[in-house]
Amino acid sequence: MWSGVGLVVANMVGAGVFLSAGFMSQELSAGWILAAWGIGGLLAMAGARTYAEAALMIPRSGGEYRYLSELLSPAVGYLAGWASLLVGFSAPMAISTFAAAAFAFAVFGLPNPRLGAAVLIVLLTLFHAAGLGLSKWTQNGLVILKGLLILAFVTLGLCLGETQWPNWAPPNEPPSLALSFASSLFFVAYAFSGWNAAAYAAEEFRSPRRDVPRAMLTGCAIVAVAYVLVNWILVANLSPERAQVVFEYEEAKITLGHVVAQDLLGDLGARAMSLGIAAIMVSSSSAMLLVGPRVYAEMARDGFLPPFLRGEPGSPPRAAVALQGAIAIALLYMHSVGELLSNVAGILVFFSALVAVGLLTVRWRRPDLQTPRAAALFAAAVYAASSVWMLYSAFKAQTGLLPWIALAMGAALVAYALSARAPS
């Protein structure tokens, strides 16, 4: 179970927690920023509770692909599987490896971080294709390192940083506080994404019905507490004006964590923070390469992808691992990090919300499955409703999300129509 908790934590924690408060502080006060992270944590826990119930009912690997195939329709599950293949894991992996290379290269004065990211993807692909034991221990080691880095930052901020409630005010008056808060919550939800990681590799747990739900709920709770603490340190130590460094993130590779570390420890602290962020992003990339190929292997088992992607029992799905690595490298060179980040968030929220809808309707659609418990149905209703609100607000603010989701769904539906389901 604890490897599953580590998998969830590794998928969830990335650089976003050290960036989002900088954008939010331009229109929201410290109280509203902390409220957004607290509410984001509660919504992530509602999503984890929803998936925990789905994992009890359907103890198989595949995540959204498997759950939506069983709860709603194979066509909807197929859409989710293709979304996972094209953007759900490959795009965040490209984002994370590029960030890792950029931060590390900045410390050592090396050029061409995009090439460094591609090399890192190749190395991680080789590790995760080598064998389940090596894959597991590599991932566990990276998770332990990530946990120690977050703990060190929180300890540093609480011991040496400001402890008074911040009295700064945002420099800009939002046109609508509700819309600004909802848009911020959308990107907070992206920072929390990954709480469902254990569901993708459920069949590799010794006791999936027991351990997959526990891993998701425990990992999500740990990260929620860590995120609130990190953001308290950021809003307590930085003003909105100083937090504007996040607008130069893609060029300068400076996060709010760097600014705090430099204030408290000097240039050495900032350099250590760069290497720490690089390690955090390597761990995230590794986790995505561990769980994503399990989705494609499940699709291959069901006849929706070529049989060679299935893998052999007791071994990692090596061809699926290589496929995700290749797609991540392609996306790395085809799109900017900003384009990938904004478009992936909407797709992840959309399909996880569909799982919640499927759980709410399972009594009528699939009476042969175990009846969901009342607490799980309440969590699913909360998660689905909040997702609709966030998606609506995000679409109003950034209509470019609509074509991306429509394109991904259209391509997957065409592929579904052309593929023949293999006989069982």
Image (tube, grey):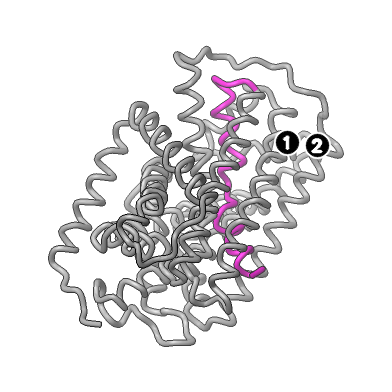
- Front-most of residues 397 and 423: 423
Give the residues drawn in magenta, as a range: 1-29
Q: Residue at x 39, y 59 (%)?
A: 64
Residue 192 visible, this angle: yes
Residue 323's disc number: none
- Whether the magenta-drawn stretch holds residue 16 is answered as yes
Instruction: Indicate whether residue 134 is drawn in magenta.
Output: no
Kindly indicate whether the residue at mark 2 contacts the one at mark 1 (C-beta within 8 angstroms). Answer: yes
The residue at the point 42 percent across, 63 percent down is: 63
**Which of the labelled discs sits on residue 260, or is there none?**
1
Is 225 rendered above or below residue 52? Answer: above
Question: How many numbered discs?
Answer: 2
Q: Could you tell me the amino acid type at mark 1?
A: Val
Location of mark 2 (residue): 264
Label 2: which secondary element:
helix
Left or right for 10, reference 70: right
Q: Quadrant of the C terminus?
A: bottom left
For the residues marked 1 and 2, what is the alpha-carbon distance in whole angstroms? 6 Å
**Can you say whether 125 is above or below 348 in the image?**
below
Q: Is residue 193 above or below residue 166?
A: below
- In the rendered view, does 89 fall on the left or right side of 236? left
- Give residue 20's quadrant in the image: top right
